[in-house]
Image (spheres, helix red, strand yellow):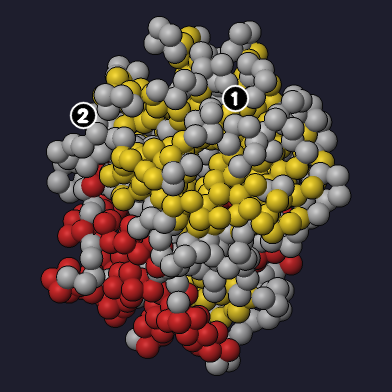
Amino acid sequence: MHTLRHGAAAVLGLALATGNLTRAQAPENLVVEGIPPAPPALRDRASRYLEFRAATFQDWHPTRREVLLATRFAEATQLHRVAHPGGARQQLTFLSEPVAGGGYRPGTGEFLVFSQDTGGGEFYQLYRYGLEDGRAVLLTDGKSRNTAARWSHDGRWLAYSSTRRTGRDTDLYLVDPADPKTDRLLLALEGGGWTVTDWSRDGAHLLVLEYLSINESRLHRVDVRAGSREQISPAAAEPVAYGPGQFAPDGRSVYVTSDLGSEFRQLVRLELATRTQKPLTADLRWDVEAFDLSVDGQTLALVTNEDGSSVLRLLEVATGRELAAPKLPLGVISGLKWHPSRAELAFTLSSARAPSDVYSVEPATGAVTRWTASETGGLDPERFVEPERVRLPSFDGLEISALVYRPDAARFPGRRPVVVSIHGGPESQARPVFQGRNNYYLNELGVAVVYPNVRGSSGYGKRFLTLDNGYLREDAVRDLGALLDWIQRDAGLEATRVAVLGGSYGGYMVLACLVHYGERLRAGVDVVGISNFVTFLTRTQDYRRDLRRVEYGDERDPAMRAFLERISPATQARRIRQPLFVVQGLNDPRVPATESEQMVRAIREQGGTVWYLLARDEGHGFAKKRNQDYQFLATIQFLEQHLSPAPELGPEAPSR
């Protein structure tokens, strides 16, 4: 903790000691180095792309057909209530920091509990919010990280995970939110990956997930009265990944996703008496990524990830038969939840042509209801580009894939410049969600945007997920080299005008690409990226350090430490010759600000060009609108300057 604070102060010192600060147009909370002021004409052109909104489902009201959702109308995301489909969004919370999520008290709904951090630090606190008086009452200690709050079915107790005891371990706590003085430690645990996923209907037991890595987790049942736990997932010869589970109504079995004996995560029923698993989706060759059991226990709603797109499915519990489910737009579904007193299922849906919005389905009739229609800045969503899926062989013959968004060929003929946008994680996946501000690159600059899924990405089976672990790290970078080869072969793309962009682990990939393929790239944008794996692992927050060692390697091992030092971009900065734009939040608990500080310094020491943007009030990525706006306008300028053969990009004659 002391090291992180010292490093953050050093970042500010680095910025303030630099004479090249541009304060015009920048919010005072931003430290700006080397970034020219955005011309008024640019802000005018981009203004509509700064006003996209999204709505994400949070909860059903327990007794009424109305939804709780999160959306932003000012600077930060807040909770809103919508009383009927298409109705006005009534704002409930009015806070300076974003609200991370919330839900009603089951049964009565007279208040709700929400989660919020400060400055992007991810040390979330839980608050009770009174719907009558609008007062927020702190339920947690105000200092530790408190997550994964789960209500008991009777609405009396809230169970959650907290780092309060050691700062590293995520113990289990209980509180009656109506009386904050009841807050108490239920069970002390070891490790940072413990999460409550459900209560039994009688309130006697908790279902708890112990996350060890993306490929290994365990299920436990906790006796609430005794404060004891037992592992209920069966022992296996190889690591098994379980997802969040739910108790059956009688408490004798558990529904959960598992890849035991399978390449993909199946939905299974785990019998508690015998510890045996019965697959319910054995015929599906894709991951089941989310599910919810109806209150009457008769229907399971589940979402499969099929080549990145979500498919909603319904299963009849008694027979295992798949029921007819309505066909939804191609996109990604999240936040799946049945209404507590009616047969209706709500969720969030995001697609290439629509921001995240709240929908519901009534299986009995097949009716699909859209509750919100989020704004798109006055732009016609039908003009937004749908992605093309491409598959290509990598250096070793492994098939990788990408989503390719191409600008309108009539407006932008010829070969087009390319931005390769690399996801983080690395256990994440590029998916066909709404492009938001990136639509500006396509519709106004005529730049194609390519989202690769290289080895280590999720969604393609557990073997694919592990192919970049430890000493295999740079094989994923070689996958990006294969993608650059594909870009060179594509008749619609201009291989001499390519930039790479990515955040978090994707930021590392940007830096690694500039190290290994700099002669094939024009520029890179690194957002909260890892620059040195050893310093990252020693300075990331205590509660997540061991979880990251499983993915990247343990820096305490001398051989692994030497390998991580060798492949880290900060130790190879002399090889980076292309311009770089680095973006960082000062309060980032995952990738500390020192990672960007040392990268910026290393580039400057060898005479390179680097723009630097630091937000004092942000963490792992920017969440406040004013900061997001400045970052986006600066990124446009950076790409215009380095991707265009002329001062500005735009419609042009074919280059070849």
- 429 or 617, nearer to the observer: 617
- Which residue in the protein does label 1 denote? 338
Question: What distance separates the C-alpha of mark 1 from that of mark 2?
Answer: 30 Å
The answer to whether residue 650 is visible is: no
Horizontal and vertical percent position of residue 471: 17, 60
**Left or right of residue 38, residue 275 in this image:** left
Residue type, label 1: Trp
Q: Which mark is residue 261?
A: 2
Q: Residue at 58% across / 68% down in the picture?
A: 143
Q: Disc number at residue 572?
A: none
Q: Is residue 543 above or below residue 180?
A: below
Location of residue 495 by image quarter: bottom left
Amino acid carrying mark 2 in the image = Gly
Q: Nearer the viewer, residue 583 or 492?
A: 583
Tell me the quadrant of the picture where the N terminus can be found.
Answer: bottom left
Residue 326 lies, in percent from the top left, at 55, 15
Q: Is residue 183 above or below residue 270?
A: below
Looking at the image, which residue is at 56% across and 49% down?
174
- Which percent across, then down, holds residue 191? 35, 58
Residue in the foreground of this view, choosing between 375 and 220: 220
